[in-house]
Each structure stands twice: as C-alpha cells, then as structure tokens.
Amino acid sequence: MDLTGVMPALITPFTKDNMIDARGFSLNIGRAIEDGVSGIVPCGTTGESATITLDEHKQLIDIAVDCATVPVIAGTGSNNTGEAIELTRYAADAGADASLLITPYYNKPNRNGILAHFDAVACAADIPIILYNIKSRTGINLEPDLIAELAEIPNIIGVKEASGDLEQVSRIIEMTRDNDNGTDFIVISGDDALTLPIMSLGGIGVISVIANIAPAQTVAFVDAILKNDREGARRMHYKLAPLVRAMFIETNPIPVKTAANMIGLPAGPLRLPLVRMGEANEKELRDALVTAGLLS
C-alpha cells in the first residue's frame, strides 16, 4: 500500500433534513479520484466525526470502500477505547486499507494510558494504523519519543502530524528511521500550510482539507515536491497559500463545507454545534475562491 501523495480528509455531505447524503459523498469521492488523489480519508475531523453516529460512521466507511479505487484510510479514533476498537475492527472487516486514530481527547490520559490505548486498538484489529497527532484538538501532544515507542507496535505504520512544530516532525523522522519492525514509519502532513516543509523533511504527503475543493491543484503541488521541482513547488505553495488560510479562518470544517457549497459540490449543512460562518469571513472565503479560479 503506497500512501505517497494527496489524501483528502473528506467532508461529510448532509441532506437538508440532516441525514447522510450518500450519493453526494460518492460523487465527491469520484471527483477527487479523477483528479489524481492517492487515497481518501473518510470520518476524520473534516468529516464531522464528532457529530456522526456510530451507524453513520460505519455507513460512510462502507460507501468509501465501495467507491474507491485508491486506498481508504478510515477515521476510527475515539476517546473511548472500546468504541475505537469497534470502529477499527469494522473498518478492517469492511475492507479499508488503514485506519486513522486520533489521540484520546478530553480524558487526557497520561503516557502509559496513551500507550495502552493505542496498543489495545492495534492488537484488536488486523489493519495498518496511522496515529493522528493534533494537540489543538486533543490537549495532548504525542512527543517524538512516544511516537517512536508506538512505532514499535507492528501494525502502527505512521503518523499524521498536525502539531505545527517542524522541529518535532524532524525528530519523529530521525527517531523512526531505523524502525525495528523492518518497515519505514511514515509521516504525513496534517496541515495544508506546512505540507512543503514537512515533505522537505521526509514526509510522504498530506491528508488535506483543501483537496476537497481543489484536488487537482493540490495533487500538482505535491507532485512537484515529489519530483524535487523546488521552484515549481515553492511557486504553487504561495499560490495556494491564500486559499489554505481561508480554509481555517473559522473552525474546520466550517469554511471547507461552505466553500464546497459555494462551488456546487455536495456538502449541505453543518451539524450543531457548528454553525454558518460570519458574514465577513464568508466574503473573505468567497474572494479566496475567486482568486484561486474556483469561483467566478
């Protein structure tokens, strides 16, 4: 399984009555694959995983596996270890290629608790696991030495790094290069704004928010990095930068779902407690889409 490249963190489209828009979800997956993405990531933060039910979570995994001709990395994390095990086992049985497991949030386990959580899930499900490190959401940072220890668990194969700390990314890669598992531990950017520097350090790609609305442009950007086209990659980084900033002027996924609705992609409403963007921010987002050539 090669996860090198761009993997959109898929939005979850809802109908007007707040149900899963299965057809819209399938259409968005098809569009992203046609534009060259390397994989897809359903049921992550961008997919409003915090407010989809367990059954909806499973439904989305099934749709993604059925539609995709690229690897499916299913978000299966929870701060409830039992629930994370159930979802990760379901993803494995459904045919997902890997699972993405966020650090337990709110309960704030200590180091031993974090190790026990990920070990329990890894032992319970026969599927490659990618850790998801995002302190801004969980209140806990997976330190490089802890990630290196987790990397010794046979089916933990990598980390989505969204700490915002490039020194930490460098240390993670340094400390996992000689993995006792005999496989390369992979680092994937979890922040569109830092894809270029993270890949320059040795990251293999990005789990991307902007790839929901601009998959072809994001793929071209990452391809330039992979081809060592430094000038081209730098040029595309700065070209995409205003759009990337606009995607995070309010809590993700509010801007990206708003943008998807603006350009005519299936998205639908947000689920409470997320609500519509402020008027000024919505105008800034619209202007960024026009500048990027995604909206006339």
Image: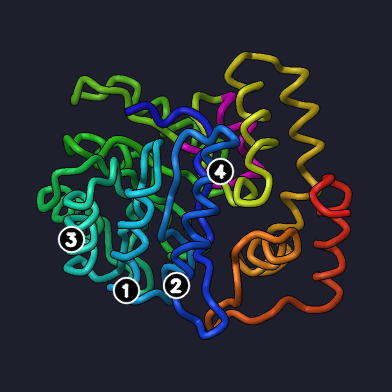
Sequence-first tag of 1 and 2: 2
Please provide percent x and percent y for residue 135: 48, 58
Quarter residue 253 falls in:
bottom right
Residue at 50% across / 52% down in the picture?
Answer: 9
Residue lying at the far top of the rendered structure: 228
Q: In this view, does 281 lie to the left or right of 276?
A: right
Q: In whole angstroms, how far apart are the C-alphas of marks 3 and 2? A: 23 Å
Q: Mark 4 points at which residue?
A: 32
Percent coordinates x, y for residue 181 in the rendering: 19, 25
Query: Which is nearer the eye, 70 or 159?
Result: 70
Look at 30% across and 58% down and name the residue there.
Answer: 76
Q: Nearer the viewer, mark 3 or mark 1?
A: 3
- The residue beneath circle 3 is 85
Q: Mark 1, mark 2: which one is toward the viewer?
A: 2
Q: State whether residue 48 is above or below residue 10.
A: below
What crowding class fits label 1: few (fewer than 14 Cα within 10 Å), some (14-19), or many (20 or more)? few
Is disc 1 placed on a helix, strand or loop? loop
- Left or right: 273, with 215 as reference point: left
Separation of residues labelled 4 and 2 (CA atoms): 19 Å
Q: Tell me if mark 2 has few (under 14), some (14-19) or many (20+) residues whose alpha carbon lies within 10 angstroms of its own.
A: many
Find disc 1 in the rendering and name its residue: 107
Work out how far the residue at label 1 is from the one at label 2, CA to CA, in angstroms.
29 Å
Please tell me the numbered disc located at residue 18.
none
Q: What residue type is labelled 3?
A: Ile
Residue at 44 percent across and 59 percent down: it is 44
In the rendered view, tell whether residue 198 sits above or below residue 257. Answer: above
- Gap between marks 4 and 1, in whole Å? 35 Å
Residue underneath mark 2: 20
The amino acid at mark 2 is Ile
Kind of residue at badge 4:
Ala
Q: Give the range drawn in magenta.
A: 188-200
